[in-house]
Amino acid sequence: MGLDFANPVGLAAGFDKQAEHVEALAALGFGFLELGGVTPRPQPGNPRPRLFRIPRARAIINRYGLNSVGVDAFASNLSRCERNCVIGVNIGKNSDTPNERAPEDYERCLEALYPHVDYVSLNVSSPNTAGLRELQEAEALSFLLKRIHARREALRQSHGRHVAIAVKISPDLEDAALAQMAAVLRRERADAVIATNTTLARAGVEHLPGSAQAGGLSGAPLRARATRTVRILAENLGGEVPIIGVGGILRGEDAAEKLDAGATLVQLYTGLVYRGPGLISECVSACRKRSRTASSASR
């Protein structure tokens, strides 16, 4: 991505949706923060209640629906923060923007955030905005990346700095769709892919209270599905596009598993709810141990 990370463990999008807690979150020991998601115009998201814990499964279901203060207020908040780690922002379209005009929304967010961030993540995978996942289809994603790269080039010339472009994908894609996506990411020169967002599947939690709630499932039940997605992407990308692994990391071993599957970096969110901030250093230690072991084995 052209960036230097103090460590490979980051905060996943959705935790700080308004860029109000950047310094505090960085102080917990993250190597990078992904803030947002944020949309061009303010929007309230879906009606409450929209967040549900399933403690017995160490899982969460959310259907926030990209509630956002809007990119201008978000950028204003971020401009007042002291940046002491790599900062990314997850960006999406407004819920009332039709998909054929979605690139305009992503461009608007990129323009407003460009002076303040190290990378942006194109959210084309939230299950809580109707039709959004259609932007993962090969033709739509290719068109979106072409538009974003063209806009970034103009912004790079005017600002004199580079901002990386990542794509955040769903864990619910079949193997053939993942292979197609990998081909698009390579062809359009994405800087990274984030695997994965939350899942619509309920395998393993169907019998638990709250599991029938609509929304995306995160936490321990997502781990294997997300890791599988990382592995298939790695096989198809051939090392050309770095992978950020996220989904179901509740132990240091889970973070190392994502690296073994082909990720270069990892992100946490639901694990913080169930484990607290100590999970961050545990994952950093596990990733470093795994890297040392891999380095020794290659000698």
Image: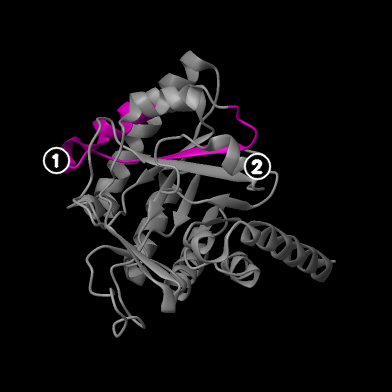
The amino acid type of the residue labelled 1 equals Pro
Q: Which residue is mark 1?
A: 98
Could you tell whether 33 is left or right of 112 in the image?
Answer: right
Q: Which mark is residue 16?
A: none
The structure residue drawn at horizontal position 50% and vertical position 16%, both measured from the top left corner, is 159
Task: From this view, report whether residue 23 is shown above or below residue 72.
Answer: below
The amino acid type of the residue labelled 2 equals Ala
From where the camera sits, is residue 72 visible?
A: yes
The structure residue drawn at horizontal position 65% and vertical position 33%, both measured from the top left corner, is 84
Image location (x, y in percent) of residue 252: 65, 68
Q: Which mark is residue 27?
A: 2
The residue segment tinted magenta is 82-111
The structure residue drawn at horizontal position 64% and vertical position 72%, both measured from the top left corner, is 253
From where the camera sits, is residue 2 visible?
A: no
Under circle 1, the secondary element is loop
Q: Residues within 10 Å of mark 1 (few under 14, many from 20)?
A: few
